[in-house]
Image (cartoon, rainbow, N blue to C red):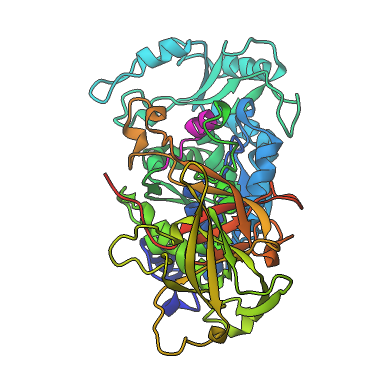
Amino acid sequence: MTTNENATPVNFIRHIIDNDLKIGKNQGQVVTRFPPEPNGYLHIGHAKSICLNFGIAAAYNGTCNLRFDDTNPEKESDEYVQAIMRDVEWLGFQWHELRHASDYFEQLYDYAVQLIKDGKAYVDSSTPEQMRANRGSLTEPGKASPDRERSIADNLDLFTRMRAGEFADGQYVLRAKIDMASPNMNMRDPTIYRIRRVHHQRTGDNWCLYPMYDYTHCISDALEGITHSICTLEFEDHRPLYDWVLDELQTPRHPQQIEFARLQLEYTIVSKRKLNQLVMEKHVNGWDDPRMPTIAGLRRAGVTPAAIRDFCERIGLTKQNSWIEMGVLEYCIREDLNENALRAMAVLQPLRVVIDNYPDDQTELLEVSNHPQKPELGKRQIPFAKTILIEQDDFAEVPPPKYKRLVEGGEVRLRGSYVIRCNEIIKDSAGNIIELRCSYDPDTLGKNPEGRKVKGVIHWVSEAHAQAAEVRLYNRLFTVPNPDNEENFLTVVNPNSLEILQGCRVEPSLSGAAIESRYQFERTGYFCVDKDSTAELMVFNRTVTLRDNWVKD
């Protein structure tokens, strides 16, 4: 039993495990696994499964394996294997054992031979088109293949020769012999082996005969001693096949398959095929593009592992598919970053301000807090000089109602610094404002001016000392909540999902900050140092705005 029940929400899977432990099932053990196929990068839906499987194991003092379902070498690669391992570790989990389905290829083959000998499997020469035509429908039974009654001896001979590479790809398959009239289509003599001459990223060219997922998965679970095989709801109809294979083979362990609703997050897609299409057709800049729902993309965007784990905990587990609002994930991100991100000042669209009454050759180092609610995070020094930069929209020549920032003849406080007054506007020949001439009150550092109240506070950086930066403002990749419902999901890709701001300036304390360092740019949002940063030009990705400003259609 978990030793911290009061702190951990109870869900239906925990109820099942609690009951299993109560009756002494599985000798009191809890062993889970996370079994991705290495044919792409992990996404936010996988994060839910990772948190669930590793979290369940930890809660019950059990173990969790990471097992790669590498039975489809045409689409798999070591690049994806390494990326998946990085993602699992980055999320904060460590597997008990690293396994691969290919570890069991010999045992899987031997089990298939056993099924043939028991009259429970046969070699079939039907083409894929013939098999589809003979499978039947939900209202009509399927038709048996002419090869279904092939003799055991002939089946064994053909299967041995299939392994030896005597036949062309697709010439034969091995099918389980179950029930062509079953109301469950998955039980109508499913294919369990097929011939594929494809180089495997682990076993090389040792095999030209590869097992199918439904056959491989349950046996791999049994061989690893998995007690609870937790998977998403689309595998519920596959559970009878899972149990049939293990029952027929009489494996020493028979794991219990439990299904839960997969994560469906608005404004995203999690189909690996479609994600791959986005990458290959360059609608995004790689698998780790911050607009992608991949764990690598979320990481590059500046999302923390803690925020993802919190999100997965908050949405809970159900047996009913439902859509999760993007705002829930963004809330978890803001909660974590508000608590842990250091503060900094950055000017994304600079407007030059010259303080006429400040000494030309003077620079002050002003001390400001790294986090207003966490004094233990210390302070930093920011240079203040005669010429500073502020945001263009922090000045208005014709201010709207209730405008509390800088106007001509008005005052505003610079964050952590002095009160300044705008005395003159400088424009270019086209009438654009290019500079403000201001004055400062030297008696207002850390205190209010005498006899007057200044309401507005704006951020700034010293022009001479600021670090050059490029800032990438990321928005949601799709314009509709469920792009999968569209006939062509590419038609609803958001054309404004990325805005790149050049000429930005950040305070000099950020110069040389480590990749993935996260900051709250005061009054602007949360940002992360990108891997494209150089000594001359830092690059920041916007993780999330300070508050939800997404307007729903």
Where is residue 285 shown, x and y percent of the image?
Answer: 59, 36
Where is residue 262 shown, x and y percent of the image?
Answer: 40, 47
Q: How many marks?
A: 0
Where is residue 484 shown, x and y percent of the image?
Answer: 36, 34
Residue 259 vs 148, above or below: the answer is below
Q: Residue at x 36, y 14 (%)?
A: 134
Where residue 225 sits, quadrant-wise, is: bottom right
Viewer-proximal residue among 104 and 115? 104
Viewer-proximal residue among 254 and 520? 520
Q: Is residue 483 left or right of residue 270?
A: left
What segment is highlighted magenta in the picture? 268-278
Residue 276, magenta (yes or no)? yes
Q: Is residue 552 left or right of residue 53?
A: left
Residue 443 visible? The answer is yes
Q: Main secondary structure of the magenta part?
A: helix
Viewer-proximal residue among 196 and 174? 196
Where residue 313 sits, quadrant-wise, is: bottom left
Q: Residue at x 53, y 15 (%)?
A: 151
Residue 187, magenta (yes or no)? no
Residue 264 vs 334, above or below: the answer is above
